[in-house]
């Protein structure tokens, strides 16, 4: 669907400002709750560079079998910046179909530069059946212009989206990490529209402050940094949504379930998870695809983002992947004995 046709199909949507949306949201917003482990989904490709639907279905099942409480499709881990609009829409629809209502599916695909293209891609994504549409903060303020630029862009986009569609926010690192200010957090919270923030501040005090700001609301702060994962859970992060949910989401799920406890096992697991995630710089997301190839989730490890083989560029990364797997199995055995 072209930009002009999407815009035309949404041209009759009533214009209203954020303040009036607050009133509509409280009365008619669809219910969705994000709490727990939210894998940032990979996109399996075929050797012909098409989305591998069979592999995607198996990947969804793997996430669900390993403790996922929601799925984040069409995000940076999904290589969304390298997907066409048709591919982004197809990926979201397929994920919703494969999840089959067992967990909420949220999706973004918010990558365009111009406001018109952003409205088109978001309006199309809103029709895929997802539980929440995730807006990327750096697209709302591409040049880091500050609060007024962010507020104006948000207001414009909200005019063109269904008033009953829950929304999310994502401090996506690419093309630049645009963190939300406290005033912007409050602005979004007070719309009543937002149900999740993928927090990429990588700062425990920021997570704690944001969790306090959204306490008692349906707006979940979900930390994405493994180094602070355990302490962030204890500080109010409603789960975890980092890249290593593509390796051992079940271990994050166990840690979250035991976040109010303290034991040597819990502390050791938190350290293991933090150190394992340091491998992200060794060719992710292709590194994760190599891991899933080993698991048998899908066959092809092709990535549009990682255009090289991690084992060739990052010395001993294959051995590191072995250690990550062995460590995860060790912790699973220890947990089984508790």
Image (cartoon, rainbow, N blue to C red):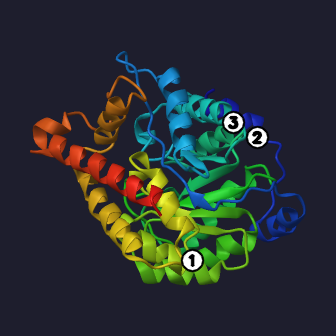
Tell whether 188 sits left or right of 91: right
Residue placed most toward the observer, 289 or 196: 289
User: In this rendering, is residue 214 above or below 277?
Assistant: below
The reply to whether residue 170 is in sight is yes
Labels in figure, total? 3
- For the point 36% across and 65% down, the residue is 269
Q: Which residue is mark 1?
A: 236
Residue 174 spot, x, y in % from top left: 38, 54
Separation of marks 2 and 1 at Cα, in angstroms? 38 Å
In the depicted view, which residue is nearer to us: 300 or 165?
300
Residue at image x 54%, y 32%?
85
In-image side of 169 versus 203 (left or right): right
Q: Which residue is mark 3?
A: 128
Q: Residue furthest top?
A: 48
Q: Pointers 3 and 2 in contact (CB under 8 A)?
A: no
Is 230 situated above or below 126?
Answer: below
Image quadrant where residue 188 sits: bottom right
Q: Is residue 201 visible?
A: no
Q: Position of residue 252 (x, y in %)?
A: 46, 59
Helix, strand or loop under label 3: loop
Residue receiving disc 2? 10
Local SS, label 1: loop
Contact (CB < 8 A) between labels 2 and 1?
no
Residue under the point 58% across and 75% down: 184
Q: Position of residue 38 (x, y in %)?
A: 54, 54
Nearest-to-viewer mark from 3 and 1: 1
* Sequence-first disc among 3 and 1: 3
The residue at 63%/31% (across/down) is 98
Is the residue marked by circle 3 packed among few (<14), some (14-19), or many (20+) residues within 10 Å?
A: some
Q: Position of residue 185 (x, y in %)?
A: 60, 75
Label 2: which secondary element:
loop
């Amino acid at each position: 669907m072209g930009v002009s046709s999407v815009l035309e199909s949404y041209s009759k949507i009533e214009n209203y400002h954020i303040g009036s949306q607050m009133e509509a949201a409280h009365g008619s917003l669809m219910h969705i709750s994000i709490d727990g482990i939210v894998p940032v989904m990979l996109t399996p490709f075929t050797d012909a560079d098409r989305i591998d639907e069979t592999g995607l279905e198996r990947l969804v099942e793997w996430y669900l079998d390993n403790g996922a409480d929601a799925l984040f499709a069409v995000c940076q881990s999904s290589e969304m910046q390298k997907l066409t609009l048709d591919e982004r829409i197809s990926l979201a629809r397929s994920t919703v179909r494969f999840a089959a209502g067992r967990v909420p599916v949220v999706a973004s695909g918010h990558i365009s530069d111009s406001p018109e293209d952003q409205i088109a891609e978001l309006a199309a994504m809103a029709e895929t059946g997802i539980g929440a549409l995730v807006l990327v903060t750096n697209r709302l303020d591409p040049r880091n212009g500050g609060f007024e630029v962010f507020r104006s862009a948000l207001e414009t986009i909200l005019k063109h989206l269904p008033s009953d569609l829950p929304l999310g926010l994502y401090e996506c690192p690419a093309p630049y990490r645009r963190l939300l200010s406290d005033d912007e957090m409050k602005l979004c919270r007070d719309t009543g529209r937002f149900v999740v923030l993928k927090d990429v501040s990588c700062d425990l005090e920021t997570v704690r402050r944001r969790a306090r700001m959204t306490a008692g609301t349906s707006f979940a702060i979900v930390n994405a940094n493994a180094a602070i994962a355990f302490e962030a859970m204890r500080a109010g992060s409603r789960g975890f949504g980092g890249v290593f949910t593509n390796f051992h989401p079940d271990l994050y799920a166990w840690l979250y379930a035991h976040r109010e406890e303290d034991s040597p096992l819990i502390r050791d697991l938190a350290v293991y998870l933090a150190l394992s995630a340091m491998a992200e710089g060794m060719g992710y997301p292709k590194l994760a695809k190599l891991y899933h190839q080993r698991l048998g989730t899908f066959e092809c490890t092709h990535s549009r983002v990682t255009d090289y083989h991690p084992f060739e560029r990052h010395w001993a990364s294959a051995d590191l992947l072995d250690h990550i797997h062995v460590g995860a199995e060790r912790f699973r055995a220890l947990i089984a004995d508790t």
